[in-house]
Image (cartoon, rainbow, N blue to C red):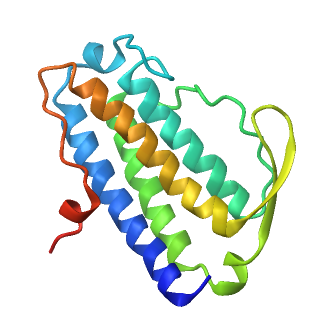
Amino acid sequence: MTDPLLRHFRMLAVYNRLANRRLYDACSRLTDAERKQRRPAFFGSIHGTLNHILVGDRIWLARFSGKEVPSTGLDAILYERFAELWEAREREDARIEEFVGGIDEEFSSATIRYENNEGRVLEDPVNVLLPHLFNHETHHRGQIHDMLSQTDVPPPVLDLHRIMRP
């Protein structure tokens, strides 16, 4: 991975934090019941999907640090209370930025061995897994965006070029 690509991932880490703040701000305008309302989504609700994104980030950051963590419990509710979930999200986004800020070309050309949620042991290059970390968040933020559109709270603008504009 070349230096421009490392800069690109650092930019994505900043975008990730800012997009999550916008999304959580919009979600904070819902009642707890609205956030937890069952909806046709992979993780059943806005609250469930917000928790899932955090679960995924923790799994990948652990793997990137050399821990073997199976991707089980993908639907775990880590935080029932929205305020606690938002605080945890802020801490995780800071961890992601710190992690990505410390990546060097040696690490970016490495591979990671891990167990997926089907129990299969896989080995993939970091230069594939790092984009997955950000794509995973974007994918599920899109689902939350759609679920917000089913409420009275307007979904926030999450376009990278709009969030990153000075």
Left or right: 56, with 50 as reference point: right
Question: In the image, is residue 85 above or below residue 111?
Answer: above
In the rendered image, which quarter contains the N terminus? Answer: bottom right
Q: Residue at x 48, y 72 (%)?
A: 9
In the image, residue 76 lies at what x, y percent?
58, 26
Q: How many marks?
A: 0
Single out the residue that lies furthest toward the right: 121
| Pick the front one: 26 or 42 | 42
The image shows residue 140 at horizontal and vertical percentages of 44, 38
Where does the image place residue 95, in percent across and percent down from the top left? Answer: 50, 63
Viewer-nearest residue: 57 or 136: 136
Frontmost residue, 3 versus 31: 3
Residue 154 position, x and y percent, is: 13, 32
Instruction: Please report the residue visible at 27 percent of the width from the left and 41 percent of the height from the top.
Output: 24
Q: Is residue 65 above or below residue 157?
A: below
Residue 80 seen in render: no
Work out whether residue 138 can be spotted: yes
Report the side of 104 relative to 148 (left or right): right
Quarter-of-image position of residue 115:
top right
Quarter holding the C terminus is bottom left
Tell me what residue is drawn at x 72 percent, y 56 percent: 63
In the image, what residue occupies the spot 51% across and 46% down?
A: 136
